[in-house]
Image (cartoon, helix red, strand yellow):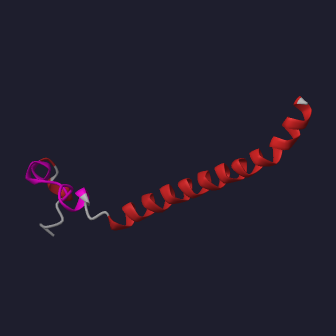
Amino acid sequence: MIRVIALASLPLRMPSVVADRAIGFFVSAGDFWRARMARLTDRYHPERHYMRGPGPKWREKHPEADINSQ
């Protein structure tokens, strides 16, 4: 009797495995899409605000590298 029940319930378990894999695929694809869209639409670029090149103290220490004096 146990063998018959196990064989009868086997087809019911297979679609859930397929569904679990499909759900996992769509979840990972959605995560990938959200990450790409976040990178494309990110408007915060700190290098535009904070990294503006050497300042006056650096120019005092390196007068030969100052391109403005040429």
Residue at the outermost front position: 1
Residue drawn at the location 14% of the way across and 49% of the way down: 58
Say whether residue 68 is magenta.
Answer: no
Residue at the outermost bottom position: 70
Residue 24: image x %, image y %? 60, 51
Residue 23: image x %, image y %? 60, 54
Taking 47 as reference, is 68 left or right?
left
Q: Which of the 4 image quarters holds residue 13?
A: top right
Q: How many marks?
A: 0
Residue 62: image x %, image y %? 17, 51
Q: Nearer the viewer, residue 16 or 68?
A: 16
Taking 36 as reference, is 14 left or right?
right
Residue at the outermost top position: 2
Residue 65: image x %, image y %? 20, 58
Residue drawn at the location 43% of the way across and 60% of the way down: 34
Considering the image in quadrants, where does the C terminus appear?
bottom left
Q: Nearer the viewer, residue 57 or 12?
A: 12
**Region rendered in magenta:** 46-60
Q: Is residue 68 above or below residue 24?
A: below
Say whether residue 59 is magenta.
Answer: yes
Q: Nearer the viewer, residue 1 or 53?
A: 1
Considering the image in quadrants, where does the N terminus appear?
top right
Q: Is residue 40 above or below residue 65?
A: below
Residue drawn at the location 90% of the way across and 37% of the way down: 4
Taking 40 as reference, is 49 left or right?
left
